[in-house]
Image: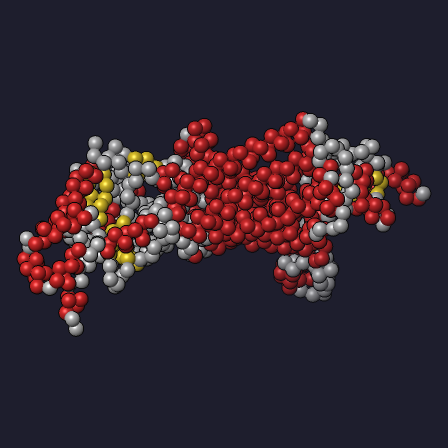
Amino acid sequence: MKFLSIFALLLFVATPLAGFAAEDDKVHQGIFVENPGTDLWRDVRQRNFAMEGSSQVKSVDSNILINPQGDEWARFRVGVLVRFASITLVIITGLLLLHYVTGGRMKIEGGRSGRVLLRFSDFERVAHWTLAIIFLFLAITGLMLLFGRPVLIPLFGHELFSLLASASKEGHNLIGPIFLVSLVLVLVRFVTRNIYASGDLNWLLKGGGLFGRSHVSSGFFNLGEKAWYWILILAGLVISVSGVILVMPNFGQGREIMEMSHKVHSIAAIVLIAVSMGHIYLATAGTEGTLEGMKTGYVDLKWAETHHDQWAQECQDKNLTISSEEFARLQGKAVDKSSTVAKEQG
Amino acid sequence: MARMKFYCDAERCIECNGCVTACKNENDIPWGVNRRRVVTIRDGEKGERSLSVACMHCSDAPCAAVCPVDCFYTTADGVVLHDKDICIGCGYCFYACPFGAPQFPENAAFSSRGKMDKCTFCAGGPEQDHSSDEFKKYGRNRLAEGKLPLCAEMCSTKALLAGDANVLSDIYRKRVINRGASVLDWGVNYDSAKL
Amino acid sequence: MGSIIDGSLWYFSLTVFVIGVVWNLVRIVFGKRKADFSIPRDSAVAGALRTLISRFIPDRHMLPRISLQVVAGYMFHLGLFVLLFFAAPHVRFLDEHILGFGWSPAPHWLFIVSAQFAFLGLIMLWLHRVINVVSRLISDRGDHIAAILTFVVMLTGCLALLETFNELRLLHRLSVELWLIYFPFSRLMHAFTFVPSRMFTGAWFGRRGVGS
């Protein structure tokens, strides 16, 4: 650099300007001043935030010369995120499989009782399945976009995957905002039953009966279900808000906000997908008789006593249980009329 | 094969936006899409500099790395191009690009962006050279005609240069040697006037 | 395959739809009916029009029990209406292929929002149909096919939103064609028959001077 400056000085001496410069020492020194441009370019290039300038071109971030965050985000998207997502999903699948094959499926203790009680109303089940359908659609389309390039392009080729990705993206963007609506329905409907109650800590200390196959006392929802509820609500709200930011580029938010939103959105989504896999497993293959509650609204009394003994007791005290014949009648199934009439008379 | 690069000399750029206009005209680019733009830093202050920016045709392009449908490719000349038939308009390349080169024809709600458009180094796209399809999707293919990008060709002060990287760095080195320190920050007049 | 969907199958489905709908309506409106010899106490026409409108408003006493169906029902039908007749690609299609004239479409965001309303409404209505015992018992296969077919039409349309992949457009068009063919033979006819149905009831009561 020094050599260059001296060299440059020598060059300038040979120009007519040098004559002018020689008249004033100060001006002469001006040439020795280090190029102020270097500071400027250091600012532009090496700062951790984007330096703002101005431009005649008016569009999102058009006044920012270099956004160093972009490259960092790209590395997160194709490296950290894909690794984190695949490892998380593989681990959770492995754990659930392990739980199942080691005989983790929880049976109803002492078999079915023949009496059932109402667990979820029609509206609650509609809200649940609405959220479930939308969630599954979003999870599948989202994962396709995330894992498409490493997994699906080698399988389908660029053209076909591009078609699938386009469909996934458009579907994800359109259905996405509905997730927030159905999430709010579930939030409002189930919040009162998901507040911490005494005895929940005890449930936690005993590991929720997940290991060792012992059953722990609990109310309508146990702490595990409450935790799932709050993970769903919190992660769901985070996903929804960041998703709305991502899906509304028309409001002109810059790249840094988009990159942040994407990071938050994807991590929260992977967490929610992982936990929801646990929820789906426990509600279907993991325990006997749980899915009935979401299908018909009614669960067996023995199931309730096994998993939610306090709630079962409350219902029994209020005389809310009904016989399975009555249940079949409520479900509109053909029942032998004479026996029903006889019972009603009796 | 040549390795194509842009180079913009901040000591020469006078923010005339001639490159922006040349690009728009040559490639028939609609409103809202700006493949090239001039950014001015410290506008009106001491040390003001302007630079013309477009796609820098990076060797290890973040846009290509992050594209979920893998629609980018690098030509033998080192020009980074993309296939609009594969692009799904997700916007990831825009988030990843440090220079803000990727552009979208729309910016409507619900991520309706249309397909990405960016500087092609006036090298068209994957379609047949000089076909009407290529022109409609990507603009002019000047490289195939043996010409350089019009933005650089039309630059009035020769601040913006385009061409083989080795040639460009030779030109720049000569300029720096001849110029010495910055020509724009001498501070000759009022500093010395002793007012 | 594409030429069949864009060509012969399209004309076939459109023919089935138009002839089926017209035939159904003619059958309903001009069908043989027992003559009413009673002396009219009030205007049948007024009653018909009154009922046609008043049935849009749910019964006040029933409302608390059917609020889900009312809200989701309106969401679905209004959303589908806007989506069907004011989405830019639909207006363009009607202009180019059927009517020969168009109108100004809704902005893109309104198109998407109405689609979201329609999706949420349809999903909740169908879930209510299978979850609520009474709804389930009074639903037959036709109801489920109609709901699912409509959902498939909406979903394929949603997936084809980028409007660049011909295969996705063909998929949407194919589902529309199946929907059109199914339309005249199914509950989907209610899109037209609700008018004569309500008016018939209204006229019958109106003639007797009774509100309905």
The quarter in which the C terminus of chain A is drawn is: top right
| Residue closer to the observer: A145 or A29 | A29
Q: Is residue B94 in sight in this rendering?
A: no
Question: Which residue: 71% across, 31% down?
Answer: A105
Q: Is residue A253 in sight in this rendering?
A: yes
- How many marks can you see? 0
The colour scheme is secondary structure
Q: Position of residue C205 (x, y in %)?
A: 71, 60
Q: Is residue A56 left or right of residue A319?
A: left
State the residue lying farthest toward the right: A346
Question: Which residue: 44% across, 52% down?
Answer: A257
Q: Position of residue B145 (x, y in %)?
A: 18, 38
Question: Which residue: 67% across, 64% down?
Answer: C43
Q: Please identify the quarter of the rendering in which residue B40 is found.
A: bottom left
On screen, residue B141 above or below B32: above
On screen, residue C5 above or below B100: above
| Residue closer to the observer: A342 or B195 | B195
| Residue closer to the observer: A203 or C194 | A203
Q: Position of residue C181 (x, y in %)?
A: 54, 39
Question: Which residue: 18% across, 66% down?
Answer: B191
Q: Is residue C106 left or right of residue A104?
A: left
